[in-house]
Image (cartoon, coloured by chain):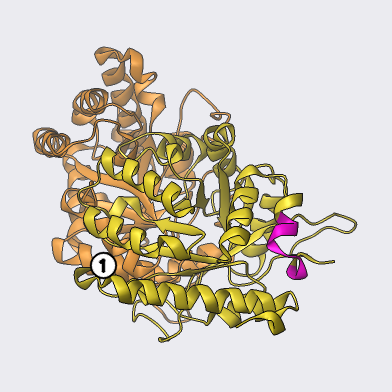
Chain colours: A orange, B yellow
Amino acid sequence: MSFYTKTYAQRAEAHPSPAAKQLLETIERKKSNLCVSVDVTRKADFLAVIDFVGPFVCLVKTHIDIIEDFDHDLVEQLQVLSKKHDFLIFEDRKFADIGNTVSLQYSSGVHKIASWSHITNAHPVPGPSVITGLASVGKPLGRGLLLLAEMSTKGSLAVGSYTEEAVKMARANKDFVIGFIAQRRMDGVGLADGEEDADFLILTPGVGLDTKGDGMGQQYRTPRQVIVESGCDVIIVGRGIYGNPKALDRDSVRSQAERYMKEGWNAYLERIGKNNQTS
Amino acid sequence: MSFYTKTYAQRAEAHPSPAAKQLLETIERKKSNLCVSVDVTRKADFLAVIDFVGPFVCLVKTHIDIIEDFDHDLVEQLQVLSKKHDFLIFEDRKFADIGNTVSLQYSSGVHKIASWSHITNAHPVPGPSVITGLASVGKPLGRGLLLLAEMSTKGSLAVGSYTEEAVKMARANKDFVIGFIAQRRMDGVGLADGEEDADFLILTPGVGLDTKGDGMGQQYRTPRQVIVESGCDVIIVGRGIYGNPKALDRDSVRSQAERYMKEGWNAYLERIGKNNQTS
């Protein structure tokens, strides 16, 4: 039985990583495979969007380094919201440096990402040392790492053998790497003869219901395309849900989040063969 | 006449980018192709190292996001040191996201990198939109961008066609991309028939005189190997110069910086065929 047709609950039960297990259990409990990407630059907007979408998401994706008035209180409030609404936090830092540097970037500085972000990600381009460096900080804290095996932008170089190498690196570090940022399932990619595959989570950005692109190289697909056709596990949606951060409307943000949550969950039910029980 | 044998002064004169011109002129004026990478986590150490090495460098490379007690005053003091010692600043941010995100990461957040860093860098893995996003912020400020065409770590995926695509992306954006982080000259790489090459600066990390590696995947070569054999333009040296940041010794830091500066400059003189005039 492939991971494609297993339920989130079955995968949670069998998963060796505490971070992956936590995420899969949250997805199952909330019946949401929706991750909202909160790309706003003011603390008040950031916390408002998260409080609005909180009930509908399994995961909140942050770019903490774009927030102008970041402070320690923001992290505390984010953690309060994470408990209140039962979601995990994913800092989308895209670490991409040598081991020594990423270990400092992850643990230190103003942002101290490892102290509050359950999940983070890295580009595999530096080679395995990027994983080793991050694992030295994150593993003792029970954190999980996603590798960027593919990107949704035009002309991305994360293709072909690059993607294959990323998956191999993940398999060699499956005590810390819990999955991929990618556009499709990676089961079997770069797998050696007789080698057993691991259950990697696939988180997929570039998901939208109403638009095709952002004019800056980002391309969009629907939740159904992503979850059913491509076998991804979590859909990542940003401005499609909260719109213009300068004109946040609570009801419209909540209803968009709910809409994406339902679309994502129905796609999942269709994938595991239970779509007749829905809606 | 290839860029390999041209002097820094000749290249400065002909270069279309204000940031590249500024760097080449600084190199020529100070007779230093040394960039010191200041990877320390405390503001006081950061400023002390930079003040010590300042007279010997053309460029200071920072990881602003590892500094625990970063504040606005740090940026002001860094800019004062940049004027006092006549060097440029290169924030080694390794941007690697979609265009909209990198433009915010570059301009905004706590660190406001574009406001003080003459040069920054990016991984080409997202495709050309990473350049477009950064250029929208940096070009109006006269900033320059380096692409990571190669990395010095074991198992790096920045090889072969990845490197070629990086160079092609740079040629298509040479009003903003001034060169590469790489291990060798990129002249002619991925060049189409009849296409004219551009003068890209090559900045090379992983340079050390006394050690072979750091145990976390970083590998080292000498200034001569890098400048003469591989045709690179600027050597990047870190802990080899300032040692343990908790036990900074002014005289030893200065003498190491001077040592690397001389080694780098002599290698350059050998490369342009003037090594008989030195020492």
Quadrant where the C terminus of chain B is found in the figure? bottom right
Q: Residue at x 52, y 44 (%)?
A: A152
**Chief secondary structure of the magenta span?**
helix
Q: Residue at x 70, y 53 (%)?
A: B12
Q: Which residue is mark 1?
A: A135
Q: Please say if B151 is above or below A153.
A: below
In the rendered structure, which segment of residues is drawn in magenta? B4-11
Would residue B6 be counted in the magenta stretch?
yes
Q: In this orientation, does residue A218 appear?
A: no
Would residue B244 be counted in the magenta stretch?
no
**Where, by quadrant of the figure, is residue B1 drawn?**
bottom right
Looking at the image, which is closer to me, A64 or B116?
B116
Q: Give me the chain letter of mark 1.
A: A
Is residue B137 toward the left or the right of residue B79 in the image? right
Circle 1: element type: helix
10 Å crowding of disc 1: few (<14), some (14-19), many (20+): many
Residue sitting farthest toward the right: B194
Q: Residue at x 30, y 19 (%)?
A: A253
**Where, by quadrant of the figure, is residue B136 drawn?**
top right
Residue A278 placement (x, y as % from top left):
30, 31
Looking at the image, which is closer to me, B107 or B72?
B72
Residue A27 placement (x, y as % from top left):
23, 43
Looking at the image, which is closer to me, A128 or B198?
B198
Is residue A97 toward the left or the right of residue B125 in the image? left
Q: In this orientation, does residue A222 appear?
A: yes
Residue A207 placement (x, y as % from top left):
45, 35
What amino acid type should be assigned to the residue bearing mark 1? Ala
Residue B70 placement (x, y as % from top left):
25, 46
